[in-house]
């Protein structure tokens, strides 16, 4: 058993602070808004919460999830890169315009359109990487950081 001397205060374990809970609550901040949107969507359109619609939404979100995953790796490394989003916008649009009859009027087969999408993405990535490597450009986020 330990003895407390007259000049020392006894220390008792304290309960965890409320500030430790705040970050976890912040992660759930958009949950009520999401629930409201689901309710409104279900009230406005009867087919909103059907299995087919939910599968369609998740399927469309899968490509965006892959883009976000790649961009998160860039952000974790301390960089800031917007070229990924523009490439994801232009490459599929060009591929689609080559494939559909009302696009450029070429009506290419689907595999050729997919090949064009991959080539456009590779060319944009190579040009962007080449410009950054040759001109030794810094990322946008690094421009604002004070030098230590």
Image (cartoon, helix red, strand yellow):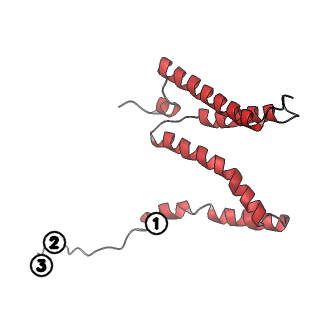
Per the image, label 3 sits on a secondary structure element best described as loop
Per the image, label 2 sits on a secondary structure element best described as loop
Q: Could you tell which of marks 1 and 3 lies nearer the N-terminus?
A: 3
**What residue is drawn where x is 13% and y is 77%?**
4
Callout 2: 10 Å neighbours few (<14), some, many (20+)? Answer: few
Image side of residue 135 versus residue 13, left or right: right
Callout 1: 10 Å neighbours few (<14), some, many (20+)? Answer: few
Q: CA distance from mark 1 to mark 3?
A: 33 Å
| Of the pair 114 and 3, the residue shown nearer to us | 114
Q: Could you tell which of marks 1 and 2 lies nearer the N-terminus?
A: 2
Q: Which corner quadrant holds the C terminus? A: top left
Q: Could you tell which of marks 2 and 3 lies nearer the N-terminus?
A: 3
Image side of residue 141 versus residue 98, left or right: left
Question: x and y percent of residue 82 in the render?
Answer: 59, 34
Label 3 sits on residue: 2
**What residue is drawn where x is 74% and y is 34%?**
113
Residue 104's mark? none
**What residue is drawn where x is 32% and y is 73%?**
14
Q: Nearer the viewer, mark 1 or mark 3?
A: 1
Q: Nearer the viewer, mark 2 or mark 3?
A: 3
Per the image, label 1 sits on a secondary structure element best described as loop
Callout 3: 10 Å neighbours few (<14), some, many (20+)? Answer: few
Q: State yes or no: discs 2 and 3 in contact (Cβ < 8 Å).
A: no
Label 2 sits on residue: 8
Image side of residue 124 versus residue 6, left or right: right
Q: CA distance from mark 1 to mark 2?
A: 31 Å
Question: x and y percent of residue 95 in the render?
Answer: 74, 33
Label 1 sits on residue: 21
Q: Nearer the viewer, mark 1 or mark 2?
A: 1
**What residue is drawn where x is 68% and y is 33%?**
115
Q: Which corner quadrant holds the N terminus? A: bottom left
């Amino acid at each position: 058993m330990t003895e407390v001397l007259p000049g020392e205060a006894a220390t008792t374990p304290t309960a965890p602070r409320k500030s430790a809970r705040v970050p976890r609550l912040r992660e759930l901040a958009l949950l009520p808004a999401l629930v409201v949107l689901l309710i409104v969507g279900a009230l406005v359109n009867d087919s909103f919460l059907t299995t087919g619609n939910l599968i369609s939404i998740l399927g469309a979100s899968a490509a965006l999830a892959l883009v976000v995953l790649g961009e998160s790796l860039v952000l974790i490394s301390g960089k800031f890169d917007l070229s990924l989003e523009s490439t994801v916008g232009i490459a599929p649009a060009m591929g689609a315009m080559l494939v559909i009859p009302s696009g450029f009027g070429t009506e290419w087969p689907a595999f050729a359109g997919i090949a064009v999408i991959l080539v456009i993405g590779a060319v944009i990535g190579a040009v962007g990487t080449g410009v950054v490597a040759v001109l030794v450009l810094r990322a946008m986020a690094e421009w604002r950081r004070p030098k230590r």
